Image (spheres, helix red, strand yellow):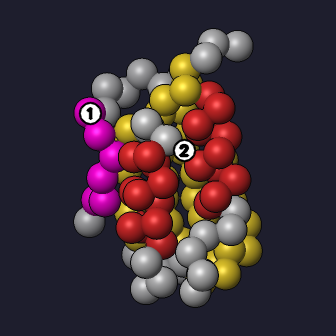
Amino acid sequence: MTEYGGWHALVLGRVQDVYFRQFVVEHARVLGLVGFVRNLPDGHSLEVTAEGPRPALAELLRLLEVGPPRARVERVEVEWTEGVTGFRDFQIRH
């Protein structure tokens, strides 16, 4: 297993309108990750794609399971990838 990789995750629960996207961006940037986060149209899920060092990816995944104070995460579904999409930074997509 290489030290660099990525994952694509769906975060389900009360995760919209609770500053979850900003929470993800702030932590991802501190961890040195690239990718994006966005609300999904169903009103109760987020999509997150992240790439970077595997230890940092594991830490962000752990943080997604908790979320910011007003969030209530019911579950996180994740699929690990090779992480070669070429993101330049971590941002919120609309």
Q: Which residues are magenta?
A: 88-93
Q: Camera-side residue: 6 or 22?
A: 22
Q: Is tag 1's residue or tag 2's residue first in the polypeptide sequence?
A: 2
Horizontal relation, residue 75 to residue 18: left or right: right
Q: Which residue is mark 2?
A: 8
Q: Is residue 73 left or right of residue 20?
A: right
Please indicate, yes or no, whether residue 77 appears anywhere in the rendered image.
no
**Disc assigned to residue 14:** none
- Amino acid type, residue under disc 2 in the picture: His
Q: Residue at x 55, y 26 (%)?
A: 53
Question: In the structure shown, which secondary structural element does the residue marked by tag 1 occupy?
Answer: loop
Crowding near the residue tagged with mark 1, few <14, some 14–19, many ≥20 C-alpha atoms within 10 Å = few
Question: In x, y percent, where is residue 39?
Answer: 41, 70
25 relative to 55, above or below: below
Is residue 21 something one can see in this rendering? yes
Q: Residue at x 46, y 66 (%)?
A: 23
Q: Please tell me whether mark 2 sits on a helix, a strand or a loop.
A: strand
Q: Nearer the viewer, mark 1 or mark 2?
A: 1
Local packing at callout 2 (Cα closer than 10 Å; few below 14, some 14-19, many 20+) is: some
x then y, percent, for residue 30: 44, 46
Q: Residue shown at 69%/53% (left/top)? A: 62
**Type of amino acid under label 1:** Arg
Disc ID at residue 88: 1
